[in-house]
Amino acid sequence: MDQMPNLGREKEMLDVLGLNTMDDLFANIPLEIRRNTPLPLPEPQSEEEIWADASRLLGANITLEDRPSFLSAGLVRNFVPTAVAMLATRGEFLTSYTPYQPEVSQGMLQAMWEFQTMVSELVGLPVANVSMYDASTAAAEAITCAVRVHNRKAIQKGVVFVSEYTPPHRLAVIKNYTQGAEIEIKTLKHLENGEVDMTSIKDAEGCCAVYVEQPNCLGMLDDTLLDIKELIGEETALIVGVDAVSLGIIDPPGSWGADIVVGEGQAFGIGPTAGGPIYGLFACGDKYIRQMPGRIVGLTKDTDENKAFTLTLSTREQHIRRHRATSNICSNETLIALMGAIHMSLLGPEGLERLALRVAANTELTKKAISSIKGIELVDPGKYNFREFAVKLPHLASEALTYLDKLGVIAGLDLGIWWKSMDHCLLIGVDDRTSESDIESLYLGLSEWIEVNK
Amino acid sequence: MDQMPNLGREKEMLDVLGLNTMDDLFANIPLEIRRNTPLPLPEPQSEEEIWADASRLLGANITLEDRPSFLSAGLVRNFVPTAVAMLATRGEFLTSYTPYQPEVSQGMLQAMWEFQTMVSELVGLPVANVSMYDASTAAAEAITCAVRVHNRKAIQKGVVFVSEYTPPHRLAVIKNYTQGAEIEIKTLKHLENGEVDMTSIKDAEGCCAVYVEQPNCLGMLDDTLLDIKELIGEETALIVGVDAVSLGIIDPPGSWGADIVVGEGQAFGIGPTAGGPIYGLFACGDKYIRQMPGRIVGLTKDTDENKAFTLTLSTREQHIRRHRATSNICSNETLIALMGAIHMSLLGPEGLERLALRVAANTELTKKAISSIKGIELVDPGKYNFREFAVKLPHLASEALTYLDKLGVIAGLDLGIWWKSMDHCLLIGVDDRTSESDIESLYLGLSEWIEVNK
Amino acid sequence: MDRGEQMSDLFAFNGAKGAGWAQPKPSIEREILISSIPKKLRRKSLPKWPRASEPEIVRHYTWLSNRNFGIDNGFYPLGSCTMKHNPRVNEKIVQLPGMDKIHPLQPEHHVQGLLAIYFEMQEMLATCSGMDQVTLQPVAGAQGEFTAIRCIQEYHRQQGQGHRSKVIVPDSAHGTNPASASMCGYDIIEIPSGDDGRLDLEALKSAVGDDTAAMMITNPSTLGVFEHQIAEAAEIVHSAGGQMYYDGANFNAIIGKTDPGRMGFDAVHYNLHKTFSQPHGGGGPGSGPIGVKSHLSQFLPTPLAGRRNQVEADPKGVDDGYWYFWQDVGENSIGKVQQWNGNAGAVVRSWAFYRRYGKELEKMSEHAVLNSNYLRHRIMNPDPEIAKKIHVMPLNGAPADLVMHEFTLSLTPLKELHGVTGKDVAKRLLDYGVMAPTLYFPTIVPECLMIEPTETESKEVLDKFASDLHKILSEDPDLVTSAPHTTDVKRVDEVWAARNLILKHPGNESGQ
Amino acid sequence: MDRGEQMSDLFAFNGAKGAGWAQPKPSIEREILISSIPKKLRRKSLPKWPRASEPEIVRHYTWLSNRNFGIDNGFYPLGSCTMKHNPRVNEKIVQLPGMDKIHPLQPEHHVQGLLAIYFEMQEMLATCSGMDQVTLQPVAGAQGEFTAIRCIQEYHRQQGQGHRSKVIVPDSAHGTNPASASMCGYDIIEIPSGDDGRLDLEALKSAVGDDTAAMMITNPSTLGVFEHQIAEAAEIVHSAGGQMYYDGANFNAIIGKTDPGRMGFDAVHYNLHKTFSQPHGGGGPGSGPIGVKSHLSQFLPTPLAGRRNQVEADPKGVDDGYWYFWQDVGENSIGKVQQWNGNAGAVVRSWAFYRRYGKELEKMSEHAVLNSNYLRHRIMNPDPEIAKKIHVMPLNGAPADLVMHEFTLSLTPLKELHGVTGKDVAKRLLDYGVMAPTLYFPTIVPECLMIEPTETESKEVLDKFASDLHKILSEDPDLVTSAPHTTDVKRVDEVWAARNLILKHPGNESGQ
Ligand SMILES: Cc1ncc(COP(=O)(O)O)c(C=O)c1O
Ligand SMILES: Cc1ncc(COP(=O)(O)O)c(C=O)c1O
């Protein structure tokens, strides 16, 4: 109760109002709908009791740092420099809200403008917004945005082709977000070897948008993607989902024709944090600006002609445009994007490259080690992988995971969870911090499991 | 190496200076005393490597929170509200230094002035400084301060009586600090029952100062102390060392005639932190102001007649008075005192009382439980204790500690470390967080040990 | 020269290559790695990010933060946004490795502690709102609305009522309400409020029909008044076959006093970041769980946190006799709205927040409402001496005796008499060291200031705000219309921004 | 009205009784507890502390912090104080429970990790300084001086040289040097510097004698010049039977290039908070370990961190093959100077700091010296265009070609020509958003500004400082003498403060 400064001063204040009891304040609530019993909740706790309970409960969790871990699947066990949280939790940032009054919010506005710049540079597109909820809603809203822009001229009205390598939880989000706009989601096929199927690309001709991921959700990079913009043409949007860190070494989609780039920002700024709060990246070409979702900051001037920042293009947004808004997003993930901005600016260009190289090196080493185990095969042999790779096991992947869990290794993701047909496949994800001994543990564990189940 | 912005720009800057190499900058160091070999130190590490090493090493320590702990002896296993560190580590506080330029340091100056006020209120004396290194140096410098004030009129010139209940490490500090000022430390005797020996007080008559602790280092409160100021008179300083938290319920020495009050501030603001940084409290009556050690902040005005704060009475200090300074203290413990101030202001008067009561309750319960064990006796039966109490064991205390350590209990302090003659005595310290189950562990452990060694 | 006059420019930092944040070397040499990337895939040139050392970055963001106003800097009466103090221990809790270093796909026996908190939160929210089942997956209020309307949509489809195509919202509704329903494919019917700012039952009656899918409404309304006819409204909508949706942004006003269940709602979202706690610096993150009555629960996004009694065979749990698990919602679930299990960090913070009040949570609502009424009273009843000096008093946005946790003022008289707009007063308030109230919302109140003090403000802060507002009302209109005067920048030209669209840094001379 | 004009007054917070930080109840009832305290011992009335809620306290201290200038806010060239950036990870490290929740008297097998760090730090400091044994106990530079002089004193006494009663310090020495020696009971002989600001060997020769206990000196000197005749000086003092004491406040200038051992010193203190890292907000904490040659080590305070090879019987250590322990120094030890084992937190932070440089620690000194020389050059050699506008250039405090990590300027000409003092310029610099350099120290340089940029400042910051200083030198003297103009308060009346001595809050009306 140490949060309410007027505790104990109720009478003094009620007197001013001419009221007797706190309940009098609620006189407008009809009796029939009043709650008459106390809430069946526990006793109030003090800070130290809450801290003790939180430490006990969360302390009972097994973390990704406690053991060799190869579970990534879109979230990253990263190392976030200490300065990031110390700066982002400064009260002026932490306890502010949407900068409706730019005159007293220049700091956050500038930070977000810088964030936009860094994201834009990262992905190679001119405009970025200040964050979406996550990579999946970013992908979903990229699709609705693209349809709004292209539907008039589209031959296949309302049709969007989505790569079959889109993980099902993301696809579910996409479907929820697009069904109301009468968008038809068709599947963009891939070849056996993981590359995009060019006949499927042909089928997409004249549709509103094509959504692919690079690397795909199995960590494979497909260089044939670099040619598809030319095939689908100007009137169909190319939307690409990325692994943000990979762009330290991998050509950004903006430079091979992507119109909208989306992705998960989490690797910059915050831990996997049980899945949230994280933040989605959203960047696009100029022609999408007025249809894009989310907040955006622009440079302008004040009445003294000094540089100033402000939210701009708000006429797209729900608080102005209401049901005709480009999106319903209001509260977004700015604070986490701020953490991302600080992390990115600490890294710098060469630091980003190094981070990507560390992941690349560990991908390489892990892939080599694991694929050398007899009985284990790469799902996409001969391809370049970043961060993740899928392997086919002799038995159910779920069994391998259980076995290795007992050995204290988090071995990856059972791909059977995503696609029943892949229940013998394991998705192994590394990060910049994967160590030789981590790889060894995984290698030994999987080898032992195969041996035991011979 | 991410700490030096000019890394890689050396040449550009050397060029401006007309130099060729970084070594040229050191041309003034004669060759005969130059180091020619690289420092035999490890490779540079990145933040994440340092963090990993620190976590590994410090993670290997067993903490007071890991197990029932009754080791206090002047430091407290406290709960510090989260807001304390979050506020005190704000860069503006954290990275400032002594406020030599008050115009841009009003924040820290005001915070310290408020700290002085709260300490003054706590101990019941009009003036407090902004911190000493710790309770021991505070006691030592209180003695030298008192001698400077009283020596002229003293009958026993240079003589100070120090309670025999002063723990030896503190006494050692006092001796180091006083020997140069030609102060003779005499022992103030106590009776068998722990109370001060009034004949010894008589012996002290006409000396410069008397130093006692309340509670004493065995946690015992002695109400006969409340009368000694009258006995020793105005020309002998009464210096009292306190347990700061106890003053939430115990009469502050200022109200029974103490001239200088010192003590450890750690309980407010910071964990025991392996013994430092902590901070010493120092408060005194007006007549000691010009002889007191340490920094002090005063309220004043600026040229616009607005309220302003500034360091004051600097003419006592080493940077002005040099070898005639009242103390050599320069860097002190302000940042930790700031943490203390924040903690105190979060507590408020009633919070302070509650904190003291929690300790008092746990002292009571623990004392009752442990003294009920057959074979264990209270050293000071029938006295009121705060936080600590000493018990006599049937065998060596060190053996009991070893035995209980194996059971996962930190049972207290072997008083044999302080005084050989007390090697069968254990000093048991509780805190506000001592739980019933902690007490039970201690009770069961000691009972078992006695049983086993019958 | 003013301190800080020169702007800190992130992209002007251009130290040595690689002088940024130090990292260990990759475990394979750079050249080998680079050449192993198929040439076509390789990045040609690095992004133009700043090259800076830690000290420079710390200083830059410290400088930025010093140009930003948050609750920690002063009163933040942004109506509808519930800008209350966020207890600091919550920030420490979410930095525990057992929170920060957790992957949402870890097996259940790795995350019993997290699941226990999830379960407790689902239960607590259901209890306080009179709903049957809660999901914590939606990550903001707007997404909660969207999710709940999606559930209602699937419900109607299942019931063979797929033709219901309209969602009714009062004209005082928050913009996210119509936007969310519209994203689900619904047409919006906006119904006008009555003269007292309240829901107009007649208007509602004439709006409902066979095509009504749902009504979305918040109570207390965005004017801060309690819709006392809410049960009747629910009756009207229900008898037309529609569902009642409760926008929980104002839930903090009524906890323990009443609940949407009692009012007749079928679904509700909670803004954890408002009612409870999740610092949403700069605009987010939030968390927008929803609660539904049992007939809607089969449609909820999946999974939920489930609980059963612990049995012998279970691994070690969290010592409360239960085993927690992720419970699949089943085939009728709408699937996912967020990639994982929602904003877990916000859930944990809100859990820590609610634990502080526990069964006395209603005290929070009481103090929020007390502060709101007190401030409104102080504003509307200046001391006679002060009243003499005031040019013109604002009008109540809603002519109610009592308000709930927030209230509106209309500055129409001021505008008419002196040409001073609500925006001018808002900007002038910035000069007094407070954040401006919500401006021009709800749109039905002309020249509206919407004020929500929250329970974490002291009487002194409220007194000062009232007297500052009185001062402004007695100031020279020119001073007010040209405000703010003491902020980091003067009034910002938003039109210029929209016309010129400079949305990224142009890069600096040194070729960055 | 200016934002923030009204002061935040901690003692004006006066909320409900007990509304402060919530705590669990005591395990025995209040009344019973109170009555169990002997009446005479009971406190009669509670201290007049503020009664505030967490939000009020957070806002108060945020407000205070916003009125305080630290390195994070800008350049802090406070000579001799080495105000460099403190890596942020260090703050996180010391909050680890294995640091924060440790009692110094825990058994050794509880604290192997801490002991390992202590041992490594002792070794590292000894290595870098050319000393034989280091203790980490002293908690500040001044206490290090005191401790080392105490050791020297005991050494002399042991050697039958107890009559040696004088300690020699140059007139450029820091005030703590004479103060520390004096606290040990020594008389101080101050010797004047030569015309070049350096140690005057002739003056030294005539000062030493049979009564010389020690000489205390820092190198580079407080003027930032390297005392190149230091070996000769050591020779002189040693042949008179005195000991050489190195004030290590400037050690950061020479690491890896030379060391006090090579220069002929017997004892040295390190300011970990300067050379390495320990944020000393507002004036401390610091850490002042000392290193000594072997003949002095038996006198060091006790205990030291010791190490031996691990054996079978040992409990689990920290996996490096060693067992660490607290090593008693023995009967000749001076005992204790701090209650425990020094400022452990500062030791750990400095360890984390040094680990970042490792064997390349000398780069830190190189950059500190590079920045210092670069800045000095920029100040003393303005562009010709700018030079024309400058009224008067400052003088070098020490006429050396090269300086070390810091340097002095004398503003005598400015004072003589325009009546503008060093203090005026210092105050005017505050208007430019930087901290003023150290003023009027060393006292041997008239109207002295002492400038230390440290290795963590960028070229741009140095360039801007030089050009700001040039601007000030070309400003209207009245503008400068009336500075500062843009700070939170105008020039502060220090004399009034000393005359009126208002050292605590008078309490507020509400009877607090
Ligand atoms: C009344 C009302 N409804 C809905 C919302 C949307 O919530 P969120 O911002 O969490 O998406 C808000 C938030 O601003 C609101 O005030
Ligand atoms: C040259 C010199 N010596 C000694 C000291 C004293 O060190 P400390 O402040 O750590 O006591 C200082 C610090 O200001 C100094 O600059």
Image (cartoon, coloured by chain):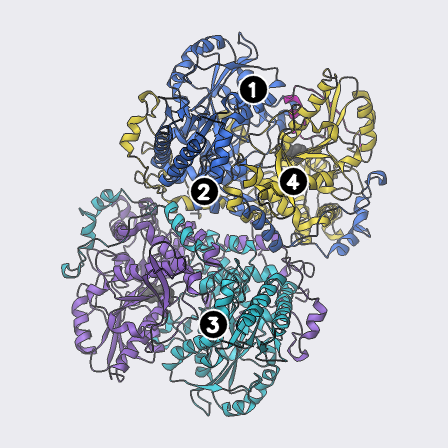
Chain colours: A cyan, B blue, C purple, D yellow
Image disc number at residue B67: 2
- Does any atom of ligand 2 lie closer than 8 Å to the CB of label 4? no
Kindly identify the amino acid type of the residue bearing the numbered disc 1: Thr
User: Mark 4 falls within which chain?
Assistant: D
Q: Secondary structure at mark 3?
A: helix
Image disc number at residue B129: none
Image depth: mark 4 or mark 3 in front: 3
Kindly identify the amino acid type of the residue bearing the numbered disc 4: Phe
Q: Secondary structure at mark 2?
A: loop
Q: Nearer the viewer, residue A175 or C300?
A: C300
Can you say which quadrant of the picture contains the C terminus of chain C? bottom right
Q: Residue A4: percent from the left, percent from the top?
A: 32, 47
Image disc number at residue B144: 1
N-term mark: 2 or 1: 2
Residue at numbered disc 3: A398
Seen in the picture, residue B6 relative to B193 is either above or below; the reply is: below
Image depth: mark 3 or mark 1 in front: 3
Kindly identify the amino acid type of the residue bearing the numbered disc 3: Ser
In this rendering, position of residue D50 left or right of residue D32: right
Report how far apart the C-alphas of labels 2 and 4 lie in the structure: 26 Å
Disc 4 packing (10 Å; few <14; some 14–19; many ≥20): many
Residue C223 highlighted magenta (yes or no) = no
